[in-house]
Amino acid sequence: MDMGVYQGRRAKLAAAMRGGVAVVPTAPERTRTRDSHYPYRFDSYFYYLTGFREPDAVLVILAGENARSILFCRDRDPEREIWDGFRYGPERARAAFGVDEAHPIGDLDKLAPDFLADRGAVHTPLGADPAWDVRITGWINQVRARARTGVAAPSELKDVCATLDEMRLIKDPEEIALMRRAAKITAGAHRRAMRAARPGRVEHEIEAELLHEFRLHGAQGPAYPPIVAGGERACVLHYVENDGALKDGELLLIDAGCELHGYAADLTRTFPVNGKFSAEQREIYQLVLAAQAAAIAAVKPGNLWEAPHRAAVKVLTQGLIDLKLIKEGLEQAIETETYRKFYMHRTGHWLGLDVHDVGDYKRGGEWRALVPGMVLTVEPGCYIRGGEDVPARFRGIGVRIEDDVLVTEGGAEILTEGAPKSIPDIEALVGGAGA
Ligand code: GLY
Ligand code: MN
Ligand code: MN
């Protein structure tokens, strides 16, 4: 992304802060085993403001007069670079990321109190990392200790995330372009998985197809642990073992999306392992598909966040009544939430740098209205676990259909439309050579 995009975001944050100082750290590296780390993932807020991907970095933004942004990052280290590879170092980082100043991260504790002096309010992520809260408080106390030199310590500590969440909720054109690409790669991965599926294969083999496609097209990896769930395992909402055998006559639910330069796709498809829906599978699948269509139709500017969920619940509940899985009238079943036995999650969430992205769903106690630039998932499902009170023919069927949807001026754009979801399109592709 062009450095001007990040400069623009920093300027917008500074304007919203109306004075004060923001201090935003990136995520720490995490040990996995002894001296081996989890793959590094930067902090989403820090990255949103900088585009900088190295660990051990902190951004400081001074707002108001003498506004400027300062990056603290790892120093160059020829010895470490032999082992771990390139690092920017402050000098190159300043030029490459368009900040006004850059310093070695080792100087942060020494310089931070100077940046906090006479600043009124400190805007920082609060409560996410207790050690960070203590560090910030320590710097404030150091400024207090200098009171007799005439400097004032910040008197307010504010959660910078509240402002950044609102900014991140409305995607800018650069983010939308990346999310389109992430969605396209992900849709291709689901097509590949459909082609590869057949009875006798194992879930992890299909997971491998997805991961192959993600990396092949330059995505950094999955945005969240993929769910590849055959048969009744589809009814376990967070199933991630992915080690079960795929059986003839069963459905396969795949919930997997890639992360591309920090941005997530989140896509679910459900299809028959043998390429042909049974009568019961077809009934449930059509119902979820109709619920999803109703929900997507409700995604448009001005509609409330809750509108897609309400639309999906209405269609699903009526369908469950028609199938005699619910034995109440529509209004009562919705009122008493009887449908939750079969549909226990909500219809979507914001999507962006985080798969469950930031942004309030309510404002002032009311569901917020959709506006262009928001990206959300639309993901109704129906999960019929075994049980005496459920007709045997439906038991063990779990279906979810999930797409990523951008709110546009005219309504909605389905970013993940490259993944087939109509019954004929799915049946033409599964286990075969179709595109
Ligand atoms: N894959 C996570 C979700 O659908 O919310
Ligand atoms: Mn989702
Ligand atoms: Mn998902």
Image (cartoon, grey):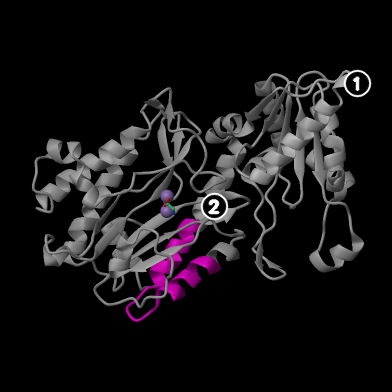
What is the CA distance from the residue labelled 2 to the residue labelled 1? 53 Å
Q: Is residue 1 visible?
A: no
Q: Badge 2 local density, few (<14 within 10 Å), some, or many (20+)?
A: many
Q: Position of residue 83 (x, y in %)?
A: 82, 68
**Residue 277 screen position, x and y as percent:** 23, 66
Q: Amino acid at mark 2?
A: Ala
Q: Residue at x 74, y 52 (%)?
A: 55
Q: Quadrant of residue 293?
A: top left
Q: Residues within 10 Å of mark 1 (few under 14, many from 20)?
A: few
| Residue situated furthest bottom in the rendering | 200
Residue interval drawn in magenta: 186-212
Q: Which mark is residue 182?
A: 2
Q: Position of residue 59 (x, y in %)?
A: 75, 38
User: In the rendered image, which quarter is residue 1 located in?
Assistant: top right
Nearer to us in this view, 255 or 233: 233
Of residue 134 and residue 255, the one placed in the foreground of this image is: 134
Q: Amino acid at mark 1?
A: Thr
Label 2 close to label 1 by CB (< 8 Å): no
- State the quadrant of the C terminus: bottom left
Classify residue 431 as left or right of residue 58. left
Taking the magenta stretch, the answer to whether it contains residue 352 is: no
* Placement of 322 over or under 148, stated as above or below: below
